[in-house]
Amino acid sequence: MVAFLDDLVARFVSDADDLAQAQRLSVALAGGGDAGARAYLDLCRLVGESADDTAGLMSALDDLAGAPVLEGIGALVVACFAAVRADYGARQDAQAARSALAVRAGDVFDAAGEAFGADMLSFLIRLSGEAVVQISALAASRAPLVRVETGLSLPSSLLAYDLYGDPERGAELVARNRAATPLVMPVALEALAT
């Protein structure tokens, strides 16, 4: 049951205090009962809040699709806390994360309610609802993506200078557009609105 959490802690949590807290929660979880259930949810929260690589963590959670109900609940709790901590470069990135979280939650709700009752279902609905609200607020504060058409291939640093007045942001354009080389960017590309 906790093997997936132990794996996530080992891969994504590096702070010494968080690792010590994770160890304490794992011991409490092994005790079972109500204290074990609370420790399980607290450990899931800890992983979501303290992960160094949020994108990698979300990808690892995607690998848990089709997992047993309890692991699905844990993955949803981790995802809710991780999603509100993620750094979204553009409004559309945050909107996509919000939609993905809503889908993940929808996949867990019915099974969680059937297996653990109305209290668990209510907790998950409130948690995911609050996460969606916070991601929506983040989305509203981010710049939108715009489509830029140049008519000819230009270096990313020149495009970044023309768009932002900062040639150093060329790397951002290369990454966002998955360009093979910064010297020859596509003639139509996505960029953050200024």
Image (tube, rainbow, N blue to C red):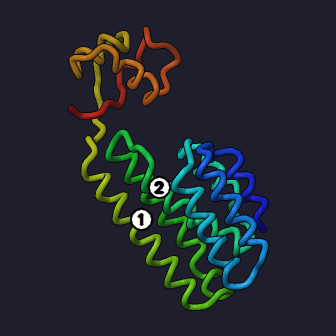
Decide: is 182 above or below 144: above
Q: Residue at 39% of width from left, 44% of height from top?
A: 88
**Residue type pointed to by label 2:** Ala
Which residue is disc 2 drawn over?
83
Across and down, in percent, residue 119 comes to 54, 89
N-term-proximal mark, 2 vs 1:
2
Helix or strand or loop: what does disc 1 sit on?
helix
Q: Residue at 60% of width from left, 82% of height from top?
A: 110
Quadrant holding the C terminus: top left
Across and down, in percent, residue 84 comes to 42, 56
- Please state which of residues 148 and 9 is positioned toward the viewer in this rendering: 9
Q: For the residue carrying disc 1, how many other residues have a C-alpha within 10 Å: few (<14), some (14-19), or many (20+)? A: many
Across and down, in percent, residue 107 comes to 59, 71
**Residue type pointed to by label 1:** Ala
Which residue is disc 1 drawn over?
131
Decide: is 106 above or below 149: below
Residue 121 lies in what quarter of the image?
bottom right
Across and down, in percent, residue 141 comes to 25, 49
State left or right for residue 152 relative to residue 15.
left
